[in-house]
Image: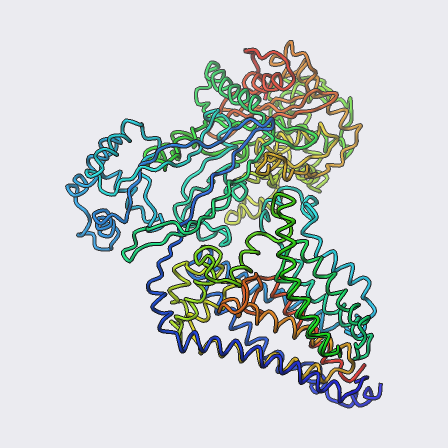
């Protein structure tokens, strides 16, 4: 020690003394509370008369990009049954006990809930199923029905003795001013499940029975929309009956979330998807029941519209969905309307993928602008025993690279694919991955699937049990080149590819969140657009591809759909073959071609041909975006 | 250098044992185990209980990093880093006030995942930075602060730190700064009568802050500086009968829980008060109330015993320090721990006002955990360099 040791020693002693004093003070206090007055406190604990109940916060609203409310709240009257009622409690305990002999009989349920059930147009069993729901916090009143008509409420109130434990409560439920429009993006709400509850962040204060977002934006932005619960401290008497409110901390309403969706465009996208299904049926593709459409802002990745068919009405979830309704929504026969096919559907992209193959070919020097090909209709480069057909069996004859895009000539892309195979570097797959295919885009919506970009390693693993199927063959690469084979993409991924081509090779991460608003409606936080990937395509190559894509809508396979359209559109049709199904119709594109703003992707499952089914839908969605007139288009297309 | 040759002669084990202070590690580990048991018990029955207990253990694991780093750093070098450390200190305390800091860069997607969840509380590590800065300052006086000018300079630094923390505002951490400084000045040789001035100024300060704040609130028309609930907590302490169910609710419930624990407690996981949700913040600031109810006076004595052992070991390290600077760092850490123990346990038994200060090594919360582990690292750094390099 540098300084006077004597002096320091006494100071350390003083510090030690402070330690001893502080700990002793605490010890004495604890001794007095726990040992001397322990019994008094134990008695206090037993009679603790203060109960805390939580007050639910109103959920934040979901707005469209222009601030129009897509999901809001409305007050409604709910009928609930209080489980604390003696008669009700007895029935619940017997139903929940392991002993099934003890279960309430039909007659008992009829007696307890018969009158109520009749008024609510339910059966006593249905009412009791909700009352005895073990998922709800024990003391919480069980909501049996919401949106109960006023005359029913009046009768229930008048004859309250006849309805044991029944209460009328004002509650707030979700309202959808645009009905089912945008249902897949918006999602729906429901009671928190036991798994969700167990996995939730403890500091968020969830309780069983709480309403939470279950799908779409409602689920994705749950933490923002939820708000903070309030709490009310009430004094109760010895039997637990509330005497007075002692303290109340009001709940804090959840924050509003503004999405990138434009509800007007969304509406048109859904209408056009429905129209495409009708058009498919008109062309005798009667199995067409489902599809998806996506619109992206090419410079920011904002999702302007995202439609999926068939759709559902989010209102059916209010106050708890009935078992019959749930079965309908999750049934194969109804084509799984809850699925958002724009991000959950994985399809072969067919000819719309030729954009990727073409750019990859240009980049690798395999092809070039104006390169001449010969299409005999039947292509036998891989050997006469492995023929591949162009969709046009009579052949395109001599055709340029650009003509191959315009006419969607398969032979041109077989050639390019075969050359990629011979180079043995899986460059085509690598290029597709650069566009984001084969992995999730990371859009801020739950449930997105990755799709698949097949390569030799994948094939080997996929056929682990079948050694004879493990070898990567030339035909595998050739199939990918025309967007078939084992290649799978989501409509969102495909829209991103075209947005990337439009945006100079830079793919922006697609997203639906624009900003989060504070309690005064001012922007609290905004989403910052992010780059998903830079393909690294040269502007020369992109220019070649863009001009070829414009020829598609002017004189090629998309010309019928875009006849008379006032803005130059770069697009591509596709007709995907799926084993055991009718062909899937595709259209992808962006516009205006010279100064791109929007990219669109449309797919119709088993809809037939891209140019005559998906093309017209893409045309009208772009028309809405660019201020062109929307019109019904009937055209023919035999290409793939 | 004198001991250097001698050190070479020692066996490797011997040198390792010299660098490590075994008792310090033993008491720390014992407290961490005790804390983990209590957090597990307090969170059982809460939503996501297992995730919470896991997060507590992860916090301890993460804390090993600052512990190791602080240990490896030659603390004597820190003396010359006061300038940058002051900038770091100010940044830490001001950062929560900078809108959107660190979030916009990550974009909204990742921001939403952390939305509403603080990554860490900068005021916690700031305590250690404060200790290191103050140690350098006080050691300048070589153990003798006996002119009003010197005392005023040291207290000026403290005042500046308190003003910065009140920007948040975080009264509890501000008081911790005062506790740290008091312990360091005691070892640093401040004249006795200045302590009386310090105490007087602190008392006047609290009263003054309350008064000025009320005036400010009235002038601004809304809540500025101190939040109303903070004022309520202080006022309730002065007059507990004021509002037994409102702001006094926490205190009343915590006292009932601890008192009803009796001598041996109700047993782990079976505290009725804590499990029936009467006890607020039971795994964080009020963890001691859970301990008091479930393990009773016996459990409390064990905890206080562990703290005593930790502090006595720390004092021994201070005594062994090769210089005053090292002793001051240890004194600062002791001041931090002792004050937090006094304040946290004190508030749960109603002898200190309620402020949000965690109980060292016991409360759930990674920021505090990482800070306290870092403090152990600082002590080890002083210990392992007691002979000089």
Position of residue A601 relative to residue B250, above or below, is: above
As rendered, which of A55 and B27 lies closer to the eye? A55
Residue A207 in view of the camera: yes
Left or right placement of residue B58 versus residue A423 in this view: left
Is A45 left or right of A282, judged from the image as shown?
left
Q: State which quadrant residue B155 falls in.
A: bottom right
State the colouring used for the structure image: rainbow
- Report the residue at 80% width, 82% height from top: B388
B239 or A628, nearer to the observer = B239
Q: Position of residue B356 (x, y in %)?
A: 57, 61
The quarter of the image holding the C terminus of chain A is: top right
Q: Nearer the viewer, residue A607 or B326?
A: B326
Q: How many marks?
A: 0
The quarter of the image holding the N terminus of chain A is bottom right
Of A499 and B312, nearer the camera is B312
Q: Is residue A334 above or below residue B339?
A: above
Give above or below for B140 relative to B93. Answer: below
Name the image quarter holding residue B296.
Answer: bottom left
Q: Residue B75: x, y in percent?
A: 77, 73
A245 displayed left or right of A69: left
Q: Which residue is most to the left?
A: A107
Residue A418 in percent (x, y) is at: 68, 33
Quarter location, residue A174? top left
Image point 69% across, 35% down: which residue? A507
Picture coordinates of residue B87, whole percent (x, y)? 78, 59
């Amino acid at each position: 020690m540098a300084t006077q040791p004597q002096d320091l020693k006494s100071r350390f002693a003083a510090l030690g003394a402070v330690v001893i004093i502080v700990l002793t003070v605490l010890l004495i206090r604890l001794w007095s509370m726990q040992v001397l007055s322990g019994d008094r406190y134990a008695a206090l604990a037993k009679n603790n008369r203060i109960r805390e109940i939580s007050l639910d916060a109103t959920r934040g609203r979901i707005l469209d990009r222009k601030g129009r409310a897509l999901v809001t709240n409305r007050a409604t009257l709910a009928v609930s049954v209080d489980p604390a009622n003696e008669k009700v409690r007895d029935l619940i305990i017997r139903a929940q006990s392991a002993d099934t002999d003890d279960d309430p009989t039909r007659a008992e349920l009829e007696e307890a809930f018969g009158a109520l059930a009749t008024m609510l147009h339910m059966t006593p069993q249905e009412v009791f199923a909700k009352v005895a729901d073990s998922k709800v916090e024990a003391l919480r009143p069980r909501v049996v029905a919401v949106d109960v008509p006023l005359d029913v409420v009046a009768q229930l109130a008048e004859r309250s003795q006849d309805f044991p434990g029944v209460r009328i409560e004002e509650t707030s439920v979700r309202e959808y001013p645009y009905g089912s429009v945008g249902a897949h993006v918006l999602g729906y709400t429901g009671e928190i499940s036991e798994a969700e509850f167990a996995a939730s962040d403890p500091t968020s204060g969830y309780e069983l029975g709480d309403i939470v977002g279950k799908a779409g934006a409602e689920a994705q932005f749950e933490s923002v929309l939820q708000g903070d619960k309030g709490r009310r401290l009430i004094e109760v008497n010895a039997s637990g009956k509330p005497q007075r409110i002692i303290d109340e901390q009001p709940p804090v309403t959840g924050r509003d979330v503004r999405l990138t969706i434009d509800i007007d465009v969304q509406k048109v996208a859904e209408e056009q998807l429905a129209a495409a299904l009708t058009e498919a049926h008109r062309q005798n593709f009667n199995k067409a029941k489902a599809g998806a459409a996506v619109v992206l802002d090419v410079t920011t990745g904002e999702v302007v519209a995202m439609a999926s068919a068939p759709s559902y009405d989010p209102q059916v979830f209010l106050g708890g969905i009935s078992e019959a309704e749930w079965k309908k929504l999750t049934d194969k026969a109804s084509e799984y309307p809850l699925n958002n096919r724009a991000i959950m559907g994985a399809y072969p992209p067919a000819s719309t993928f030729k954009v990727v193959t073409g750019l990859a070919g240009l980049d690798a020097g395999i092809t070039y602008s104006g390169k001449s090909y010969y299409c005999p209709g039947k292509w036998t480069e891989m050997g006469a025993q492995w023929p591949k057909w162009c969709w046009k069996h009579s052949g395109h004859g001599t055709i340029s690279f650009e003509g191959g895009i315009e006419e969607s000539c398969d032979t041109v892309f077989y050639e390019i694919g075969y050359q990629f195979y011979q180079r043995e570097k899986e460059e085509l797959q690598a290029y597709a991955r650069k566009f984001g295919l084969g992995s999730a885009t990371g859009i801020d919506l739950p449930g997105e699937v990755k799709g698949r970009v097949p390569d030799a390693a994948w094939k080997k693993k996929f056929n682990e049990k079948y050694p004879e199927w493990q070898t990567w063959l030339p035909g595998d690469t050739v199939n990918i080149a025309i967007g078939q084979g084992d290649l799978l993409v989501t409509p969102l991924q495909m829209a991103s590819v075209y947005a990337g081509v439009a945006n100079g090779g830079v793919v922006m991460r697609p997203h639906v969140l624009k900003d989060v608003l504070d309690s005064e409606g001012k922007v609290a936080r905004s989403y910052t657009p992010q780059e998903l990937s830079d393909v690294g395509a040269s502007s020369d190559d992109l220019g070649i591809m863009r001009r070829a894509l414009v020829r598609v809508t002017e004189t090629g396979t998309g010309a019928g759909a875009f006849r008379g359209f006032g803005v130059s559109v770069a697009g591509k049709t596709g007709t995907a073959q799926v084993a055991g199904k009718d062909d899937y119709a595709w259209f992808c594109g962006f516009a205006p071609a010279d100064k791109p703003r929007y990219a669109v992707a449309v797919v119709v499952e088993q809809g037939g041909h891209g140019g005559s089914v998906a093309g017209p839908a893409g045309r009208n969605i772009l028309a809405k975006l660019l201020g062109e007139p929307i019109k019904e288009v009937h055209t023919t297309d035999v290409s793939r | 250098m004198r001991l250097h040759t001698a050190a070479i002669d020692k066996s490797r084990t011997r040198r390792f044992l010299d660098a490590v202070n075994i008792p310090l590690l033993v008491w720390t580990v014992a407290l961490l185990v005790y804390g983990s048991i209590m957090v597990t018990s307090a969170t059982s029955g809460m939503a996501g209980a297992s995730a919470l207990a896991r997060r507590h253990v992860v916090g301890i694991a993460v804390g090993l990093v600052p512990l190791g780093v602080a240990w490896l750093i030659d603390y004597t070098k820190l003396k010359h880093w006061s300038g940058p450390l002051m900038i770091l200190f100010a940044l830490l305390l001001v950062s929560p006030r900078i809108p959107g800091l660190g979030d916009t860069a990550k974009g909204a997607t990742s921001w939403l995942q952390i939305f509403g969840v603080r990554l860490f509380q900068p005021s916690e590590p700031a305590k250690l930075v404060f200790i290191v800065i103050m140690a350098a300052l006080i050691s300048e006086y070589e153990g003798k602060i006996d002119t009003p000018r010197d005392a005023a300079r040291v207290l000026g630094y403290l005042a500046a730190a308190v003003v910065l923390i009140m920007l948040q505002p975080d009264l509890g951490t501000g008081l911790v700064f005062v506790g740290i400084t008091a312990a360091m000045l005691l070892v640093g040789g401040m004249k006795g009568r200045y302590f009386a001035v310090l105490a007087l100024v602190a008392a006047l300060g609290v009263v003054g802050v309350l008064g000025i704040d009320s005036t400010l609130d009235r002038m601004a028309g809304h809540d500025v500086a101190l939040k109303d609930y903070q004022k309520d907590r202080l006022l309730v302490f002065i007059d507990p009968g004021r509002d037994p169910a409102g702001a006094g609710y926490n205190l009343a419930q915590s006292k009932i829980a601890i008192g009803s624990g009796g001598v041996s407690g109700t047993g782990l996981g079976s505290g009725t008060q804590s499990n029936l949700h009467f006890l607020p913040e039971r795994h964080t600031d009020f963890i001691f109330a859970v301990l008091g109810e479930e393990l009773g006076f016996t459990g409390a004595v064990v905890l206080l015993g562990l703290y005593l052992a930790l502090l006595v070991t720390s004092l021994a390290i201070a005594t062994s320090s090769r210089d005053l600077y090292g002793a001051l760092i240890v004194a600062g850490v002791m001041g931090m721990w002792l004050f937090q123990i006094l304040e946290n346990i004190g508030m749960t038994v109603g002898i200190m006002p309620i402020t949000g200060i965690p109980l060292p090594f016991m409360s759930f919360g990674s920021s505090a955990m990482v800070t306290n582990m870092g403090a152990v690292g600082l002590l080890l750094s002083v210990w392992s360099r007691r002979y000089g390099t």
